[in-house]
């Protein structure tokens, strides 16, 4: 039954948690989304994915999904059963979600009209879940398989941006086979990069987010530890030089007439942290400045670049684009995030709030954009 032609309320499956190191932030984001969805307009089915990959039926209880006393939430705490699993049929002819428990008759949970994935990182934000939903024929919020994969892999993201003429900073990539074959040669590659571009460097996982696994390295003595920390999250690592300047972010949202950019925000220097890391973002609640104190020309330029990045990667729905405004006045794009955080302190909803789109309206626009699209080639 299509939500476009029937009179029933569209049923939204909010899928969250997941197997990546960003599991807890996904749960926090889901709590904010569940709190904001208009229940008069949509039916909601919360589905959590545990860290070991089980799809669980969870409580619709946003209060239990928040960070409390620096303690991070998890799907395991919210799951209605320790063994039951939710199954999304890989069959475009129907969208019936089924709940199964060992020794019990499977229970039909009804059809799903649209999925709102609020997963971050691998196994959710990287095109894997999007591919499953394409096979199932279920519309979903956000970018498709290719754009999601490009948005997750900072190596290929930068290659795409470069091919479209967008400005990126100096970087180097150490691939898994390089490190496994000859760690000394891989390490020398980084040292040579530092000799050319200078210290400090940022060593980060190529396919992680929320500033997970990132280290700022001031010299040779901290390099091995930084590589080990990045590889703990991803066997493929990215090395970037320090770009001197201001951190500027801009949101992109798909409207009926195409993508538009929000007012930009600025991430001020974080005095208690070396950089805008996980603790600063989610635990200590570092505050961004919205709107960013830019000239009208700078604002227009970064908005244009954000939409260009959205289009270059073939994105859909939403993107947060992160930039450096260098001391010479030029913008460099650092990365895009195809499923940015929606936590109460997240920059993406704050930028749109300042642009005249409230949190509930933002959620509604994303769901409506997903319902307008078909799955498959488009």
Image (spheres, helix red, strand yellow):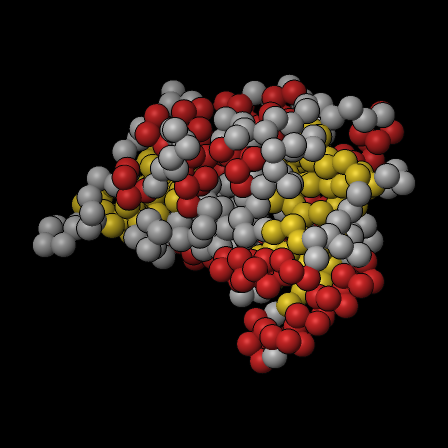
Residue found at x 69% / y 45%:
310
Residue found at x 40% / y 53%:
19
Which quarter of the rendering shows the N terminus? top left
**Image coordinates for residue 168, horizontal then vertical, percent:** 78, 52
Quarter of the image for residue 63 reads top left
**In the shown orientation, is residue 288 left or right of residue 70?**
right
Q: Nearer the viewer, residue 374 or 242?
A: 242
In the rendered image, the vertical position of residue 8 relative to residue 134, given as above or below: above
**Image coordinates for residue 193, horizontal then vertical, percent:** 76, 64
Q: Is residue 131 visible?
A: no
Q: Nearer the viewer, residue 236 or 107?
A: 236
**In the shown orientation, is residue 234 left or right of residue 5?**
right
* Count of marks placed on residues: 0
Residue extending furthest bottom? Answer: 181
Residue found at x 68% / y 24%:
289
**In the shown orientation, is residue 104 left or right of residue 69?**
left
Residue extending furthest right? Answer: 328
In the rendered image, the vertical position of residue 51 relative to residue 232, given as above or below: above
**Image coordinates for residue 231, horizontal then vertical, percent:** 53, 62
Q: Nearer the viewer, residue 209 or 261?
A: 209
**In the shown orientation, is residue 206 left or right of residue 105?**
right
Residue found at x 14% / y 54%:
102
Q: Is residue 199 visible?
A: yes
Q: Nearer the viewer, residue 227 or 116?
A: 227
**Image coordinates for residue 190, horizontal then vertical, percent:** 70, 66
Residue extending furthest left? Answer: 103
In the rendered image, the vertical position of residue 339 relative to residue 36, given as above or below: below
């Amino acid at each position: 039954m299509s939500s476009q032609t029937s009179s029933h309320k569209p049923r939204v499956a909010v899928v969250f948690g997941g197997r990546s190191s960003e599991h807890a932030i996904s749960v926090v984001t889901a709590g904010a989304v569940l709190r904001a969805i208009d229940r008069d307009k949509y039916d909601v089915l919360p589905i959590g994915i545990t860290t070991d990959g089980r799809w669980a039926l969870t409580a619709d209880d946003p209060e239990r999904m928040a960070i409390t006393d620096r303690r991070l939430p998890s799907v395991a705490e919210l799951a209605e059963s320790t063994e039951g699993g939710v199954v999304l049929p890989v069959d475009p002819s129907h969208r019936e979600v089924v709940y199964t428990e060992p020794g019990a008759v499977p229970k039909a949970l009804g059809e799903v009209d649209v999925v709102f994935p609020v997963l971050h990182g691998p196994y959710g934000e990287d095109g894997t879940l999007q591919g499953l939903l394409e096979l199932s024929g279920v519309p979903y919020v956000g970018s498709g398989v290719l754009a999601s994969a490009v948005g997750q892999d900072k190596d290929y993201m930068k290659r795409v941006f470069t091919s479209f003429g967008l400005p990126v900073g100096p970087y180097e990539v150490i691939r898994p086979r390089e490190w496994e074959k000859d760690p000394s040669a891989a390490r020398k590659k980084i040292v040579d990069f530092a000799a050319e571009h200078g210290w400090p460097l940022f060593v980060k996982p190529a396919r992680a987010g929320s500033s997970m696994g990132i280290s700022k390295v001031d010299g040779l003595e901290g390099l091995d530890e930084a590589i080990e920390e990045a590889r703990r999250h991803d066997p493929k690592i990215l090395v970037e030089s320090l770009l001197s300047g201001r951190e500027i972010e801009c949101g992109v949202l798909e409207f009926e007439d195409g993508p538009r950019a929000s007012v930009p925000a600025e991430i001020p220097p974080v005095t208690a942290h070396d950089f805008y890391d996980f603790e600063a973002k989610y635990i200590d609640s570092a505050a961004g400045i919205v709107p960013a104190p830019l000239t009208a020309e700078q604002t227009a330029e970064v908005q244009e670049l954000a939409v260009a990045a959205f289009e270059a990667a073939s994105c859909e729905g939403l993107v947060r684009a992160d930039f450096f405004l260098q001391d010479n006045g030029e913008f460099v794009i650092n990365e895009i995030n195809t499923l940015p955080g929606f936590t109460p302190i997240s920059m993406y909803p704050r930028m749109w709030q300042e642009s005249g789109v409230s949190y509930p309206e933002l959620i509604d626009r994303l769901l409506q954009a997903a319902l307008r699209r078909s799955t498959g080639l488009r």
